[in-house]
Image: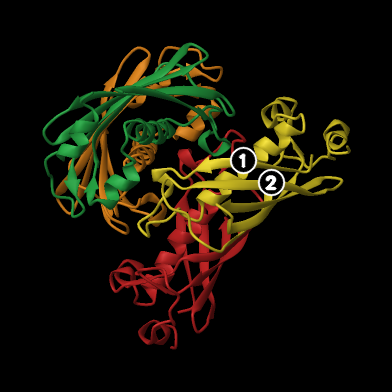
Chain colours: A yellow, B red, C green, D orange
Amino acid sequence: MKKIGIEIRVRYVETDQMGVAHHASYFTWMEAARTELLRKNGMSYRAFEEKGFHLPVREAYCRYRKSLRYDDVMNIEATLLELGGASLKIGYKIYKIGDRIADGYTLHAFTDSSGNVVKAPRFFKSLFKS
Amino acid sequence: MKKIGIEIRVRYVETDQMGVAHHASYFTWMEAARTELLRKNGMSYRAFEEKGFHLPVREAYCRYRKSLRYDDVMNIEATLLELGGASLKIGYKIYKIGDRIADGYTLHAFTDSSGNVVKAPRFFKSLFKS
Amino acid sequence: MKKIGIEIRVRYVETDQMGVAHHASYFTWMEAARTELLRKNGMSYRAFEEKGFHLPVREAYCRYRKSLRYDDVMNIEATLLELGGASLKIGYKIYKIGDRIADGYTLHAFTDSSGNVVKAPRFFKSLFKS
Amino acid sequence: MKKIGIEIRVRYVETDQMGVAHHASYFTWMEAARTELLRKNGMSYRAFEEKGFHLPVREAYCRYRKSLRYDDVMNIEATLLELGGASLKIGYKIYKIGDRIADGYTLHAFTDSSGNVVKAPRFFKSLFKS
């Protein structure tokens, strides 16, 4: 499964004095969606780290089209865009009742627990083959 | 002045279980640097909002080259890249003792307090003329 | 209904380098549970603010008994403890699969949108009468 | 030295839609002040963790008297209140230009890196003897 969607409700703490959700919050929602994308493909990211791997973020991008307010429920889609030899790119789209709110991506390296870049492990790649 | 630099120390809360500063924190540091870039040019962003303007983020991007740890002191540079008719683009570079840690940019719209896009006010543009 | 419970999953961003959820995150989960306590009693806090009221926090307390890790699912209970003339006290208990993780409370004032303390509005009090 | 003070400026991300600093942010400022209290007494908390110790929070409390706004500069005092056999209590007072804004405390356990409670190490206690 290359694409999943989850619902997230905007928390009060995630708003700022502009009255809308702060732009940095979007990256934490993308992260929550990424967790579910991996889980739905049979890989809990927690278990992945326990095996000694990490997926640190190398690039993060978001384009904000409309704003979200406190207590809004968004739908956030996470899609596997690229699974390279040592990198992973995931795309995100955020909707609210059909309205496109934002979209973005994150690019990750595969590293060991010391932060050294490693190849994407075979068992990880095989999850996304089907 | 088109470029300023400030120092920020990584807070414990900004770390995650990977043992480094979380990638979303970088956007909050960029924001702190942006505040100082405007202030050094004679415009407190707080005062700008009190005049009825906002600078919501339309795009945000960061490239992470090396990581930062708890209690590290970084130097973050903010540079005015473009001041368009209704938009503002600011670039950022984060260093730690000479090492380039990350860089990125934010693109902003000028809006009124209801969120409607407006032209960049003349008094704002004149600040960056010299 | 004086007590409700919701489930929240610990996000990666909420961990710190100790490998557990950061203590400040608990207050944001309490806030999410508070939102649902009000909603279940027929009062969306968002609608309450739109009527011109606020419930700023006057005191916040948390006792941490055990820790939570990334991806843990907690159950958080919010209970109306006191609804005074101009104040509201809510208690919280956080569990993970039966284990008590933490408990705490928040004390709130009723204010108008300018921050002046006001009496708890009658329609608010009547919600919790039954 | 049992008491230190530092200045912190409220960041935009720390505000919420009430237009003031969110109550959970206060605990992250207390943490920043705690870091400096230890450093001024000759103990970097980072070095303390590298020696295999942790100071997880067991209780956290804050009383909010007045609010802080974006770009406000606060002075936050951290004071060693108790250094017990296996616990540490630190008190905090937050001021803005003489106004008392908030005060609180955190209670910590001494643990090893596996989270087991240990005695306060002698070298730690000796720092606060003078």
The chain that hosts pointer 1 is: A
Q: Could you say where residue D50 lies in the image, as x and y percent from the top left?
A: 55, 29
User: Which residue bears the numbered disc 2?
Assistant: A78
Q: Which of these two is toward me, B50 or B67? A: B50
User: Which residue bears the numbered disc 1?
Assistant: A6
Residue occupying image coordinates x 85% and y 40% = A119
Query: Considering the numbered disc 1 on the image, is that residue within a helix, a strand or a loop?
Result: strand
Q: Residues within 10 Å of mark 2 (few under 14, many from 20)?
A: many
Q: Which of these two is toward me, D108 or D2? A: D108
Q: What amino acid type should be assigned to the residue bearing mark 1?
A: Ile
Q: Is residue D112 above or below residue A51?
A: above
Which label number is shown at residue A96? Answer: none
Q: Is residue C24 left or right of residue B24?
A: left
Which quarter of the rendering shows the N terminus of chain D? Answer: top left
Q: Could you say where residue D103 lies in the image, as x and y percent from the top left?
A: 22, 36
N-terminal label among 1 and 2: 1
Q: Could you say where residue A104 lies in the image, as x and y percent from the top left?
A: 65, 56
Do dots 1 and 2 share one subunit? yes
Residue occupying image coordinates x 31% and y 72% = B52
Q: What amino acid type should be assigned to the residue bearing mark 2?
A: Ala
Q: Is residue D115 left or right of residue C93?
A: right
Mark 1 and mark 2 residues within 8 Å of each other at the beta carbon: yes
Q: CA distance from mark 1 to mark 2?
A: 9 Å
Q: Is residue C42 above or below residue B92?
A: above
Q: Could you say where residue B37 lies in the image, as x and y percent from the top left?
A: 43, 70
